[in-house]
Image (spheres, helix red, strand yellow):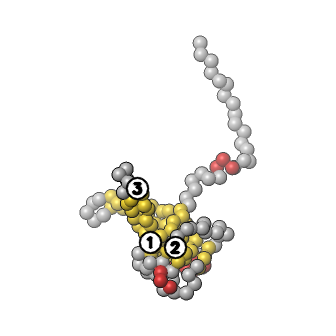
Amino acid sequence: MSKTKPKTKSTPTNDTSKDLFADTNISMKTGHLTKDAEVISDGKYAKIRFASNKEYETSEGEVKTRTSYFNALVNSNLTDAFETAKTLKKGDWVYLKGEDVTKSFDTPEGYKQTASTIFAYKVVLKKAKANAHAGAMTTSSNQEDPAPAIAS
């Protein structure tokens, strides 16, 4: 005869700390713009395309670089971030913080594709390309989270 544990009722608690990070979607990225920022959708968004490089060493000791490309949008309601984003130029080094959104769609050829976009709420110009424009360290955010120090 096997013994079973008696069922106990769980009592709800006000402790939400265990759910604090459930379904958190925060993305932080740095990279260089691959082209100038564009203002799109009748001025509602600034569109940014940038690339990040990752260096790694192979088992043979060779150092290789893998480049990843990202798209980001900044809503004009986020005034500080939008003002910084729309002035970015190709080659600028930026730090972005936001949320990732991925959508799938069918191509005209009938293939299933996915596309990811970062909806950025923090945009920091870390370094302007060859003094392309003034204010080489422009910070913008609607949050009080400082950008992490990034060594160059």
- Of marks 1 and 3, the one in the foreground: 3
Residue 65, can we see it?
yes
Answer few, some or many: residues within 10 Å of disc 1's Cα (few below 14, many 20 plus, some between 14 and 19): many
For the residues labelled 1 and 3, the Cα–Cα distance comes to 24 Å
Percent from the top left, x then y, of residue 32?
A: 46, 73
Q: Nearer the viewer, mark 3 or mark 2?
A: 3
Q: Residue at x 57, y 53 (%)?
A: 23
Which residue position holds label 1?
A: 50
Going from N to C along the chain, the mark reached first, 2 or 1, is 1
- In the rendered view, tell whether residue 38 sits above or below residue 117: below
Residue toward you, 106 or 51: 51
The first of marks 3 and 2 along the sequence is 3
Query: Where is residue 4, by image quadrant?
Result: top right
Q: Position of residue 146 (x, y in %)?
A: 64, 69
79 with respect to 16 (left or right): left
| Other residues around mark 3 within 10 Å, as few (<14) / some (14–19) / many (≥20) | few
Q: Residue at x 59, y 16 (%)?
A: 2
- Mark pair 2, 1: CA separation: 8 Å
Q: Give the number of the disc on residue 8.
A: none
Tag 1, which secondary structure?
A: strand
Q: Secondary structure at mark 3?
A: strand
Name the residue located 60 percent from the left edge and 76 percent from the top edge: 140
Spatial distance from mark 3 to mark 2, Cα to Cα? Answer: 25 Å
Check disc 1 and give the amino acid type: Phe
Residue 57 circle label: 3
- Amino acid carrying mark 2 in the image: Val
Residue 43 appears in the rendering = no
Residue type, label 3: Glu
Marking on residue 94:
2
Q: In x, y percent, where is residue 45?
A: 50, 77
Q: Nearer the viewer, residue 137 or 106?
A: 137
Q: Earlier in the sequence, mark 1 or mark 3?
A: 1
